Image: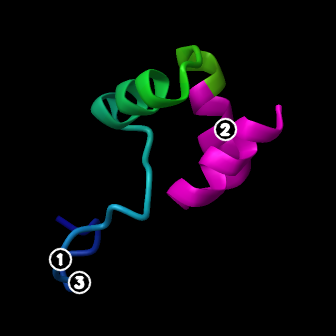
Amino acid sequence: MADDPKERGRDRSRVSTQEHEVAYLMKTAEVTRQRALEAIREAGPSREKVVEYLAKK
């Protein structure tokens, strides 16, 4: 479900700091919780940009 109630559908292209999203990112990118949160904070909510950020460092 989208973050904005007016928008319908899924928002898989975005990542948030919710615990289940951070845990998924930690597992798929094999990084620590702190590193995952840093990537979300620095790269923004785009899942693609977060993954690129983690790949660079």
Q: Earlier in the sequence, mark 2 or mark 1?
A: 1
Classify residue 18 as left or right of residue 56. Answer: left
Residue stretch rendered in magenta on the structure: 36-57
Question: Which residue is labeled 2 in the image?
Answer: 39
Name the residue type under label 1: Gly
C-alpha span from label 2 to label 3: 26 Å
Q: Which residue, given by chain and number where applicable, does mark 3 sit on?
A: 7
Q: Decide: is 54 above or below 1.
A: above
Residue beneath the point at 22% across and 69% down: 10
Location of the C terminus by quadrant is: top right
Q: Do the residues labelled 1 and 3 touch (CB within 8 Å)?
A: yes
Q: Residues within 10 Å of mark 2 (few under 14, many from 20)?
A: many
**Which residue of the protein is positioned furthest toward the right in this rendering?**
57
**Residue at the image point whose x is 36% and y is 31% from the top:** 24
Q: Which residue is drawn at 33% across and 61% down?
A: 12
Of pointers 2 and 3, the one earlier in the residue sequence: 3
Relative to 10, does residue 18 appear above or below in the rendering?
above
| Residue 48 visible in the snapshot | yes
Q: Spatial distance from mark 1 to mark 3, Cα to Cα? A: 7 Å
Residue 29 part of the magenta segment: no
**Mark 1 = which residue?**
9
**Label 3: how many Cα within 10 Å (few below 14, some 14–19, many 20+):** few
What is the three-letter code of the residue carrying label 2?
Ala
Q: Which of marks 2 and 3 is in front?
A: 2
- Residue 4, position as x, y percentages in the image: 27, 74
x then y, percent, for residue 36: 58, 29
Q: Quadrant of residue 35?
A: top right
Q: Can residue 45 be seen in this view?
A: no
